[in-house]
Image (spheres, rainbow, N blue to C red):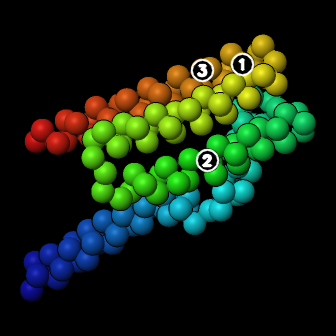
Amino acid sequence: MKKIILSLLLVIGMTGVISAQDAAGSKPKTEKSKMTPEERAKKGAAHAEKELGLNADQKAKWEAAALERIKANAPIHEKMKGSTTPEERKTLHQQGKVNIDKFDATVTAFLTADQKTKWTAMKEKRKAARKDKKDKHDLDDED
């Protein structure tokens, strides 16, 4: 009897842990999808202010540039969610890259030399993280 009760408690406990992990893992994506473009731009500007030490004028310019990029890329992201051919995806990716490059040029124009260095480091760190995630995903696909 004790073994049955212990087994039952173990199963219930494991179910709770798994549920908590699932909820924690999906939370950021859900929050991001519920945010408006304006909220996302504001959040990005606040993060840049913290990481790069932006002043109020720079933060306002960052937010405006981010909002422009987000709105320009929204239709591209929607098209990518649908069924697309590899050629279409490549074209859409290039269109999105143009918007990202425009944002980067706008932002770089008003940053100080020290902020530019930090911005470049932030981009490299993000690029490395994406590469690691892609490599991990590719390894998972091979299994």
Asked which secondary structure carries label 2, the reply is helix
Q: As drawn, is 100 to the left or to the right of 118?
A: left
- Please state the horizontal and vertical placement of residue 23, each as a whole percent of the image: 42, 66
Residue carrying label 1: 116
Identified by mark 1, the residue type is: Lys
User: What residue occupies the far bottom of the structure in this picture?
Assistant: 1
What residue is at 10 percent from the left and 78 percent from the top? 3
Asked which secondary structure carries label 3, the reply is helix
Say whether disc 2 or disc 1 marks the residue closer to the N-terminus: 2
Q: Is residue 67 above or below residue 26?
A: above
Q: As drawn, is 27 to the left or to the right of 69?
A: left
Say whether disc 3 or disc 1 marks the residue closer to the N-terminus: 1
**Do the numbered discs 2 and 1 sit on residues whose CB atoms are within 8 Å?**
no
Determine if residue 45 is in view: no
What residue is at 46 percent from the left and 34 percent from the top? 94
Asked which secondary structure carries label 1, the reply is helix
- Please state the horizontal and vertical placement of residue 26, each as a whole percent of the image: 43, 61
Determine if residue 101 is in view: yes
Crowding at mark 1 (Cα within 10 Å: few <14, some 14-19, many 20+):
some
Residue carrying label 3: 121
Crowding at mark 3 (Cα within 10 Å: few <14, some 14-19, many 20+):
few
Residue carrying label 2: 72
- Please state the horizontal and vertical placement of residue 78, each as a whole percent of the image: 46, 57
> Residue 92 appears in which quarter of the rendering?
top left
> Residue 25 appears in which quarter of the rendering?
bottom left
Q: Distance between the residues labelled 3 and 2?
A: 25 Å
> Which quadrant holds the N terminus?
bottom left
Identified by mark 2, the residue type is: Ala
Q: How far apart are marks 2 and 1 (CA)?
A: 24 Å
Q: Distance between the residues labelled 3 and 1?
A: 9 Å
Identified by mark 3, the residue type is: Ala
> Residue 56 appears in which quarter of the rendering?
top right
